[in-house]
Amino acid sequence: MKTRYKRLRLVCDRLSSLEFEKQLIPLEELLGSTLEDVRQTSVTDDDDHGIDAELFEHDEPTGADESRVLADHLDRFLELFDSAQYEEAAVLAARSPRGVLRNLDTMEMFKGVKEPPGSPPPLLLFLQALLMTVPAGEELPAALSLQLALSALQHGAVQLIIHGINNNRLTFSEDLGDELTEHAQKNPGVANVCLALATDVYSACRLRRKTALSMCRRGLIHSAADFMSHCHDLTAEDCMWVLSLSPSLVLIQLLTAPQQGRAAILSLGVSCSSLLADPQRQQLALQLLDSCVSRGQGALEEAMLQDVGSSVEVWDDVASRCSELNRADLSQAVLSVLLDQSGTRVLSPDLEGGRLMEHVFL
């Protein structure tokens, strides 16, 4: 009891001194800086007589002010924590007055101890308690949200993240989405769930290309292409970045096809040239050209003429690279289209594209 009293007096004296000196220091910072001092406080023989006298002097209660309530809460938390009652300590910290223990300093305390045999990790208990006690309309700070996700993923508690995201209790960030994506790649059993969560996070953060990439990795190719076609701030480089990380013939076919009288999102020739220059993506370019040829006579010619973003030089580069890859058939098909054009035959659906193609083949 005397040790407890001395701890209480330490906190109260610190609060009183700040009030007297008119210092404006956040209460969370104050408690964080004195937490270790309080834990190490003990009663010596020299303190014994003074404490007895002071207890007698203050025998009659004068009312519990805020500082005393906070000090009592802190002391109870330390008692539970020091006795390895981590679940009770976690709940008490999560419900601390004014949220003074809902911070990274307290998290580090739980992170630094090991769980008793057969018990959940103390860090996960604390983060779970934080999540379940978030006031309505509020979110956990970004740093704590990320730590909760990391701990939950590490211990197979994905449902905890689902609860936090679906109930808007976590602060979304690119780092949070990246951690979910990385976990999905390493754990196929929960890949679809984690990628779906990552998609929601990226979308909320307006990270367009990562949103599209997550959709592609879930197999939602048509949805991803439609999403990309409606993102006006998504560049051709962004689209190629998605393709480089999630190669898909269907996706590049959709992105290089004209959209209801509008130019395609990606230039067919430029895309093929870029992919052929990458040894790991060459086959995707060859498959794309093969798909054009396989649609029948004149299909490749029509696709090339509709491609307003590629010059003769680009298509000549495509033909040359196809030849180097022992695909003389594709090289010849591209060169035949180039040689057949006199500059007067235009198949582009819009007038501006027609003028461009006429200029290209002159």
Image (cartoon, helix red, strand yellow):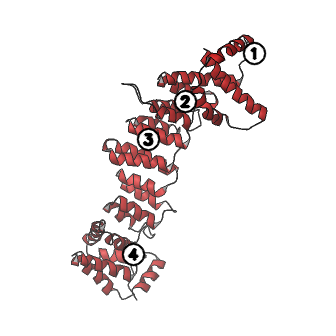
**Label disc, if present, on residue 185 of the rendered structure:** none
Residue 99: quadrant of the picture? top right
Pinpoint residue 201: horizontal percent, then vertical percent.
Answer: 48, 47
Which badge, 3 or 4, is on the more N-terminal residue?
Answer: 3
What residue sits 74% from the left and 28% below the top?
A: 16
Tag 4 residue: 306
- Contact, mark 1 vs mark 3 (Cβ under 8 Å): no
- Residue closest to the eye, 160 or 227: 160
Q: Callout 2, which amino acid?
A: Thr
**Label disc, if present, on residue 150 of the rendered structure:** 3
Query: Mark 4: few, some, or many residues within 10 Å (few <14, many ≥20)?
Result: many
Circle 4 sits in a helix, a strand or a loop, which is it?
A: helix
Tag 2 residue: 133
Query: Mark 1: few, some, or many residues within 10 Å (few <14, many ≥20)?
Result: few
Specify the farthest residue to the front. 46
Instruction: Measure how far apart labels 3 and 2 are at the Cα level.
Output: 19 Å
Which badge, 1 or 3, is on the more N-terminal residue?
Answer: 1
Instruction: Measure how far apart labels 1 and 4 are at the Cα level.
Output: 86 Å
Q: Callout 3, which amino acid?
A: Leu
Circle 2 sits in a helix, a strand or a loop, which is it?
A: loop
Tag 1 residue: 62
Pinpoint residue 336: horizontal percent, then vertical percent.
Answer: 28, 83
Q: Quadrant of the C terminus?
A: bottom left
Which badge, 4 or 2, is on the more N-terminal residue?
Answer: 2
Which badge, 2 or 1, is on the more N-terminal residue?
Answer: 1
Q: Foreground mark, 3 or 4?
A: 3
Instruction: Measure how far apart labels 4 and 2 are at the Cα level.
Output: 58 Å
Which badge, 1 or 4, is on the more N-terminal residue?
Answer: 1
Q: Callout 1, which amino acid?
A: Thr
Can residue 240 be seen by looking at this rendering?
yes
Circle 1 sits in a helix, a strand or a loop, which is it?
A: loop
Q: Quadrant of the N terminus?
A: top right
